[in-house]
Amino acid sequence: DGGITQSPKYLFRKEGQNVTLSCEQNLNHDAMYWYRQDPGQGLRLIYYSQIVNDFQKGDIAEGYSVSREKKESFPLTVTSAQKNPTAFYLCASSITSKGARREAFFGQGTRLTVV
Amino acid sequence: AQKVTQAQTEISVVEKEDVTLDCVYETRDTTYYLFWYKQPPSGELVFLIRRNSFDEQNEISGRYSWNFQKSTSSFNFTITASQVVDSAVYFCALSEAAGDKIIFGKGTRLHILP
């Protein structure tokens, strides 16, 4: 089945450690996104990528890094520089980020907890 | 700058009642796209609808309907004869044609009481 797969579903990290969240899509979508969700804050954009080997910062990129080496994959690294990393992380993709068909489809999310 | 406001943080209604979720947006672009998503307790956001700024027709899909009014910059979502399975967080979102981001509101948590 086509879709977006995020792994793992739950992730625990010790303070000071980097951790990488996986996001894979087999929808042949050009654009991919990472959002962070906190209670009462809605979804906030971390990074997005319109095409392979290119990505842009969103509204809250500090303390995060991404790569887009393959069309299907858009991993997010939460670095030790991120002061408050405990949150629910959602990956999404869309056919394109230009034109009308830009509705995003989401994975099931990764809940990251710093212990 | 683009912005989406969902003023209703949380709503509770009794099953079978109708409920309307409000969405007000701000944009300087003349061409833009509006979306509604549903987030059930499982966490995954489910796409419900996309509306283009140049298409002001309202839309109905089963018990769901959407009222798009450019004059008031609103894109409201109504659930008719609500059911317990409608309980979720609902997000309104906006994407400007000149840009390439999708900006979300803070969401409205809807409780449908049996």
Image (spheres, rainbow, N blue to C red):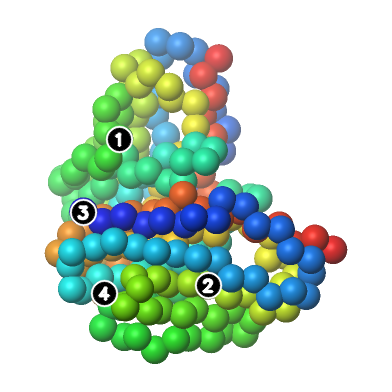
Q: Is residue B56 left or right of residue B92?
A: left
Give percent across and percent down for residue B65.
54, 81
The residues bearing labels 3 and 1 have C-alpha atoms spaced at a distance of: 16 Å
Three-letter code, disc 4 = Ala
Are the two marked residues, 2 and 3, in contact with CB atoms closer than 8 angstroms? no
The residues bearing labels 2 and 1 have C-alpha atoms spaced at a distance of: 29 Å
User: Which residue has dot 1 on it?
Assistant: A60
Residue at x-position 44% and y-position 86%: B58
Residue at x-position 39% and y-position 71%: B74
Mark closer to the chain start, 2 or 3: 3
Residue B1: which numbered mark, if any? 3
Q: Nearer the viewer, residue B94 or B71?
A: B71
Give percent across and percent down for residue B54.
26, 83
Confirm whether circles 1 and 4 share one chain.
yes
Residue at x-position 79% and y-position 66%: B14
User: Which residue has dot 2 on it?
Assistant: B77
Chain for disc number 3 = B
Bin the neighbour count of mark 1 within 10 Å (Cα to Cα): few under 14, some 14-19, many 20 and up: few
Confirm whether circles 3 and 1 share one chain.
no
Label 1 SS: loop
**Which of labels 1 and 4 is toward the front?**
1
